[in-house]
Amino acid sequence: MRIRDYRDDDTPEINLIPLIDVLLCLLIFFVVTTTFDTRSVLKLELPRADGQPATAQAQPLSILINAQGRYFVGDREVLRTDVDALKQALRAVAGEDRSRTVLIRADARTPWQAVVTTYEALGQLGFHKIANATAPSAATAGANP
């Protein structure tokens, strides 16, 4: 009696499905955990706007924020850069008049936190009419002498 040898029929094979599963899991992991740095992609120079300036009935309360984040309310410099110091300066200049328009003039290189601090102080004091000053675009500035 002869026993047949079936070893010749066994060809080795590589199953790729588990390998593909692992690679897809790694791909998803790296896509989810990757941080994207948009600061290097976007080059912004703010603010500029087109449009006609609004005519104001009363003299607005002016807040100037320079490039270093220092505040000037009216013609007074605010010595500290926190919300309480800004609120104190706004109370001294505006008094109890909360219906007055507030014009924020921020330098294009001003840190955004300084502008947000200004909005926070104005909101806590109850000012509702807030305007942002912008420079006209180069095309509009050349057209109007």
Image (cartoon, helix red, strand yellow):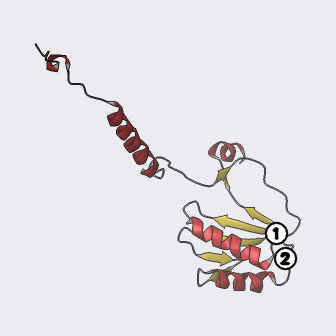
Q: Is residue 17 at least partly visible in the picture? A: yes
Compared with 12, 117 (above or below) is: below
Tell me: 99 left or right of 82.
right
Asked which secondary structure carries label 1, the reply is loop
Nearest the eye: 145 or 104: 104
Name the N-terminal-most of marks 2 and 1.
Answer: 2
Nearest the eye: 129 or 48: 129
**Who's the residue at 13% across and 17% down the image?**
5
Tell me if mark 1 has few (under 14), some (14-19) or many (20+) residues whose alpha carbon lies within 10 angstroms of its own: few
The percent coordinates of residue 58 (x first, y second) are: 87, 69
The percent coordinates of residue 71 (x first, y second) are: 62, 76
**Who's the residue at 50% across and 49% down the image?**
43
Look at mark 1 in the image and give the residue it sits on.
128
**Who's the residue at 75% across and 47% down the image?**
51
Numbered label tally: 2
Quarter of the image with the N terminus in it: top left
Quick one: which residue is furthest to the top in this view? 1
The image's mark for residue 98 is 2
Compared with 76, 144 (above or below) is: above
Tell me: 124 left or right of 55.
left
Q: Quadrant of residue 139?
A: top right
The percent coordinates of residue 103 (x first, y second) are: 74, 67
- Amino acid type, residue under disc 2 in the picture: Arg
The percent coordinates of residue 110 (x first, y second) are: 56, 65
Q: Quadrant of residue 13?
A: top left
Compared with 137, 125 (above or below) is: below
Q: Is residue 35 at least partly visible in the picture? A: no
